[in-house]
Amino acid sequence: MSAPLPDASLDQLFREARSYNAWKTEPLPETLLRAVYDLARMGPTSANCSPARFVFCTSAESREKLASLASATNGAKIRQAPCTVIIGHDLEFMDRIPELFPHNPGAKDWFPKGSDLAERTAFRNGTLQGAYLILAARSLGLDCGPMSGFANDKVDEAFFAGTTVKSNFICSLGHGTDENLFPRSPRLTFEDACRIA
C-alpha cells in the first residue's frame, strides 16, 4: 500500500501550484519534455486506449504558428513561454488497442470507428491524459499554463493535417514569473461540490 505524499509534494502539485501567464524564456531540454511524457503516459485510460497526442511547440516557428491561431492574450503567452503543448486526441485510437491492451486485443471492437462512443472515449481519455501531463510537469519542477482560447479547427489544420487527431486544449510549460499572476481564485467546498451516497 502506498503512503501519502508529504505536504511539500502536495503543495507543489496542488495547493501552491498556479496557472502562469508569464514565463522565463530559457529553453527546456528535450530530455525534460520526454521525462514529462514518460510520467504522464502512466496514468490510466479506458482499456489503456491512450488516445492523447501531444505536440511540444518549442521552436520559434511552431510557437509563432500556434500563437497566431490563439486569442491575442493567449498568443502573447505562447510567444513568451519556452514550450506550449497542444493536447489532442486520436479519433482512431482503437487501432493501437491490440498493442496497448494485449490481454484482450478484441477490445478494439468496443469502439467502432466514427461512432459517438469512440469520439467520447477519445475526448474523455485524452482530456485525462492532458491533466496527467500537467501533474507530471509540476512533479518535475515545471510550471504550467493551461489554456483554451484558440481556433481548434485551424490548429488541427496547421498541426494535425492528414491525421485523425483533433486538438483539445493547450498548455504552456516552463518556469513562470509573478508578472500578471492573479491572486488564487476561490474553489468550491466539499459541501458545495460533493455528496457521499
Image (tube, grey):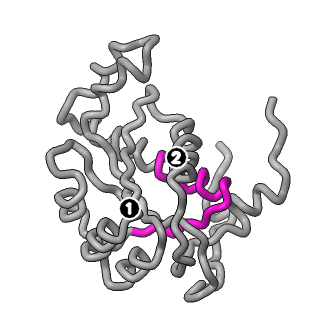
Q: Is residue 190 among what the camera can see?
A: no
Q: Classify residue 181 as left or right of residue 145.
A: right
Q: Classify residue 155 as left or right of residue 190.
A: left
User: How far is the residue under mark 1 from the one under mark 2?
Assistant: 13 Å
Residue 96: image x %, image y %? 33, 26
Packing grade of label 1 (10 A; few <14, some 14-19, many >=20) is: many
In which quadrant will I find the C terminus?
top right
Counting residues from the N terminus, which is met first, the one under dot 1 or under dot 2? 2
Residue 98's quadrant in the figure? top left
Q: Please determine whether, in this image, residue 69 is positioned above or below residue 131.
A: below
Q: Is residue 145 magenta?
A: yes
Q: Is residue 54 among what the camera can see?
A: yes
Residue type at numbered disc 2: Arg
Residue 76: image x %, image y %? 39, 82
Q: Which residue is drawn at the image coordinates 41% and 12% (left, top)?
A: 104
Residue type at numbered disc 1: Cys
Q: Classify residue 120 as left or right of residue 147.
A: left
Q: Which residues are magenta?
A: 129-147
Residue 105: image x %, image y %? 36, 14
Read off the residue under disc 1.
57
In which quadrant will I find the N terminus?
top right
